[in-house]
Image: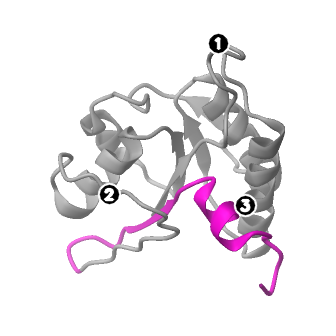
Amino acid sequence: MQVYLVQHGEAKAEAEDPARPLTDRGREEVRRVARHAAAVKLQVAEIRHSGRLRARLTAEILAEHLSPPGGTREIEGLGPTDDPGKARREIEAAQDSVMLVGHLPHLSRLASSLLAGDPGREIEGPMAVVILGGLVTSTALNLLVLPMLALRFGRFEPGE
């Protein structure tokens, strides 16, 4: 099983639009990452999101390219200030590979909880992919932080 943690794409400022939809740039960044993920044949059974508009739109764009059999759905525990324990329990209960679309600082606390067992040790920075494998579990954790991938690597095209 693999777990993909994805930060939503760039969103409009709350002063501009309180619902905070994705900006044009944010939509394009997510599309670029989604096309790359599809090109490398990334597969997930379901994409789960926080329910906030920017996360839902990010999940929908990813689903257009990845076609997860379970589609997308909102779950509790992925909001910016939510306790990472709830999302960790979702991951531990998952039978198949899943993608979770959420927000910072929650995703860094969740990654820290999964990697270091301590949600207080935030994992930050322009991280692209973190893979965790071990003898105790056969789980791989792939941390994709959007829009950092798009900003760091520019274009996502197969073979680059």
Using the image, determine if residue 90 lies above or below residue 160: above
| Magenta stretch encompasses residue 144 | yes
Q: Residue 49's x, y, as percent?
A: 56, 34
| Residue indicated by mark 2 | 123
Instruction: Assess disc 2: are there few (<14), some (14-19) or many (≥20) residues with their C-alpha within 10 Å of its C-alpha.
Output: some
- The N terminus is located in which quarter? bottom left
- The C terminus is located in which quarter? bottom right
Q: Amino acid at mark 1?
A: Pro
Q: Which residues are magenta?
A: 135-160
Q: Residue at x 71, y 17 (%)?
A: 16
Q: Amino acid at mark 2?
A: Ile
| Residue indicated by mark 1 | 18
Question: Quick one: 23 or 58, which is closer to the camera?
Answer: 23
C-alpha separation, residue under disc 3 versus residue under disc 2: 21 Å
Instruction: Assess disc 3: are there few (<14), some (14-19) or many (≥20) residues with their C-alpha within 10 Å of its C-alpha.
Output: many
| Residue indicated by mark 3 | 33
Q: Residue at x 37, y 68 (%)?
A: 139
Note whether residue 40 is visible: yes
Question: Quick one: 121 or 34, which is closer to the camera?
Answer: 121
Q: Residue at x 63, y 69 (%)?
A: 152
C-alpha separation, residue under disc 1 versus residue under disc 3: 26 Å
Say left or right for 48 vs 72: left
Q: Sequence order check: which comes first, mark 1 or mark 2?
A: 1
Using the image, determine if residue 76 lies above or below residue 61: above
